[in-house]
Amino acid sequence: MSDVFERVKKIVVEHLDVEEDKVVEKAAFIDDLGADSLDNVELVMAFEEEFDVEIPDDAAETIQTVGDAVKFISEKLGK
Amino acid sequence: MFDLTGKNALVTGATGGLGSEIARALHGAGAVVTLSGTREEKLQDLAAELGERVHVQACNLSDAEAVDALPKQAGEAMGSLDILVSNAGVTRDQLLMRMKDEDWDTVIKVNLEAHFRLCRAALRGMMKQRWGRIIGITSVVGVTGNAGQTNYAASKAGMIGFTKSLAMEVASRGVTANCVAPGFIESPMTDALTDAQKEAILTTIPAGQLGKGADIAAACVYLASAQAAYVTGQTLHVNGGMAMI
């Protein structure tokens, strides 16, 4: 498990108040983790702060699952 | 009755008749206040009058980039931004058939678009802290209409619809969005009216007198307070009964 995944997972668990084992790469924020569209916006904001990266709105829309977030952030960080 | 101690507020158009009263009232209730406007000197005068717990941030509301940056600057100066009062507004009155593009554009830009930009930038912090108060100063004419003010009335009605939609989006995060709609308020604008014009206006106001800036400011203090947490998406009309909506 990558460091990025662990950090993303921590944010998701805290923000959505879900069980850690539910936060897997395939889990969709809205369909599987009970997020609403506003939660998605807040998660993106939290990722931006945690990783000090900018996630543009059009990219944010493509981030639907935990894996999407990890992939996008990892690419941004060049990892 | 309403205590805003520990809250940080940004007031635009703070040098105007209404804006300065709103700033005084929020400050008087204990809030830290950032005064914004275009006339730096007048902002400094008001800041000097208020004394402590005051910051000044000049901003031209027709400059989109400057508007986008304003809530962040205010938040950094005060430590957070809890209360936003969009009070700045301009008029370019003209019959529609004679209205120039720029009369329309300026009014929409300063009165409506700036509010959108300020809210968007202010929300980030408010959502995170799960507490925020957004107050837009609209106008009775945004609801009743007024000949010669198609642009102004559109901007003020727009603010009301905007506020309702925004209120729905952020209510679950402890952020409220409301409007205050002044009727005829004593100001340099109403001072310029002739006695005959004033008489005519007063016949339409059941209270029999013009409102004061402090009447509007008191409505803002209430909506900014903890006690108004369950009030959102509303327009509070303060007009002496001239329009009951």
Image: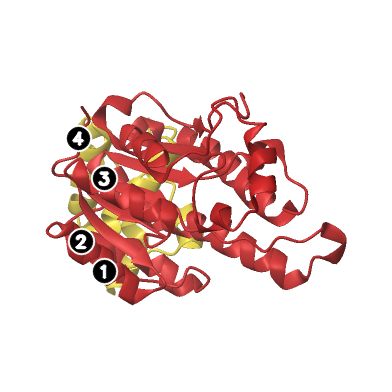
Residue receiving disc 2: B49
Q: What residue type is labelled 2?
A: Glu
Q: Mark 3 lies on which chain?
A: B
Report which quarter residue A50 is drawn in.
Answer: bottom left
Q: In this view, does A59 lie to the left or right of A26?
A: right
Q: Which chain carries label 2?
A: B
Q: Residues within 10 Å of mark 4 (few under 14, many from 20)?
A: few
Which quadrant, please, contains the C terminus of chain B?
Answer: top right
Instruction: Name the element at disc 1.
Output: helix
What is the distance, in whole Å, between disc 4 and disc 2 at their CAs?
Answer: 55 Å
Compared to residue B59, the image places residue A12 above or below, namely above
Q: Colour of chain B?
A: red
Q: Nearer the viewer, mark 4 or mark 2?
A: 2
Q: What residue type is labelled 3?
A: Leu
Q: Residues within 10 Å of mark 1 (few under 14, many from 20)?
A: few
Instruction: Name the element at disc 4.
Output: helix
Q: Which label is found at residue A20?
A: 4
Callouts 3 and 2 close, C-beta under 8 Å? no
